[in-house]
């Protein structure tokens, strides 16, 4: 059988078999290039976060701590106003003022940066509060 195939090639007849190795090589190169470039394309897109409304639910003020942050990064808890530094000192100095088992809800102005949110959450987490998150 091999001799017959070889004889056809020598006579100049067309080969009806397809060699798919180069095709697979090209597909693998394309796949790798897409895998590398896909994460870079998503970082370059400018986005604006959507705004939405949730159904109103009655917040449990009795069994939680509500920290409200305004656009000037002032934090209001129990009608007292703190800066980031004074909140850090208050959390360290007055550990018994707030019960650490209570959840802490953060309510932010839309102009407050995400970095400030993280700093405030870390202040509460480092002070020993287990449940810290945004108030929705």
Image: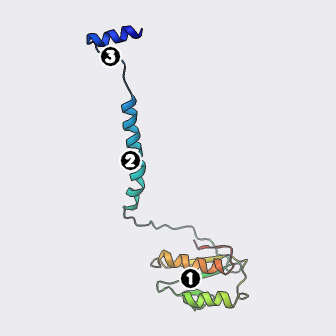
Which quadrant, please, contains the C terminus? bottom right
- Pointer 1: residues within 10 angstroms few (<14), some, or many (20+)? some
Q: Which residue is mark 3?
A: 15
Q: Which residue is mark 2?
A: 33
Is there CB contact under 8 Å for labels 3 and 2? Answer: no
Above or below 69: residue 41: above
Is there CB contact under 8 Å for labels 2 and 1? Answer: no
Kindly report the distance in space between the C-alpha atoms of the residues bearing marks 3 and 1. 77 Å
- Pointer 3: residues within 10 angstroms few (<14), some, or many (20+)? few
Above or below 54: residue 121: below
- Residue 21 image point, x, y percent: 39, 30
Choose top left, top right, bottom left or bottom right for residue 59: bottom right
Kindly report the distance in space between the C-alpha atoms of the residues bearing marks 3 and 2. 33 Å
Say which mark, if any, is on residue 68. 1
Q: Residue at x 36, y 32 (%)?
A: 22
Whether residue 92 sits left or right of residue 17 in the image: it is right
Is there CB contact under 8 Å for labels 3 and 1? Answer: no
Above or below 2: residue 94: below
Choose top left, top right, bottom left or bottom right for residue 29: top left
Query: Quick one: SS at disc 2?
Result: helix
Pick whichever of labels 3 and 1 is earlier in the sequence: 3
Pick whichever of labels 3 and 2 is earlier in the sequence: 3
Please state which of residues 44 and 136 is positioned toward the viewer in this rendering.
Answer: 44
Say which mark, if any, is on residue 103. none
- Residue 115 image point, x, y percent: 50, 76
Q: Residue at x 37, y 32 (%)?
A: 23
Which quadrant, please, contains the N terminus? top left
């Amino acid at each position: 059988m091999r001799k017959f195939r070889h004889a056809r090639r020598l006579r100049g007849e067309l080969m009806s078999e397809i060699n798919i190795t180069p095709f697979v090589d090209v597909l693998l190169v394309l796949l790798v290039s897409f895998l590398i470039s896909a994460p870079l394309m998503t970082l370059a897109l400018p986005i604006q976060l959507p705004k939405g409304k949730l159904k109103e639910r009655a917040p449990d003020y009795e069994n939680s701590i509500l920290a409200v942050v305004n656009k000037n990064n002032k934090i209001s808890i129990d009608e007292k106003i703190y800066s980031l530094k004074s909140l850090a000192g208050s959390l360290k100095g007055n550990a018994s003022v707030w019960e650490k088992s209570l959840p802490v809800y953060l309510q932010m102005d839309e102009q407050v940066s995400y970095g400030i949110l993280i700093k405030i959450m870390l202040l509460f987490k480092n002070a020993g509060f287990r449940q810290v998150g945004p108030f929705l």
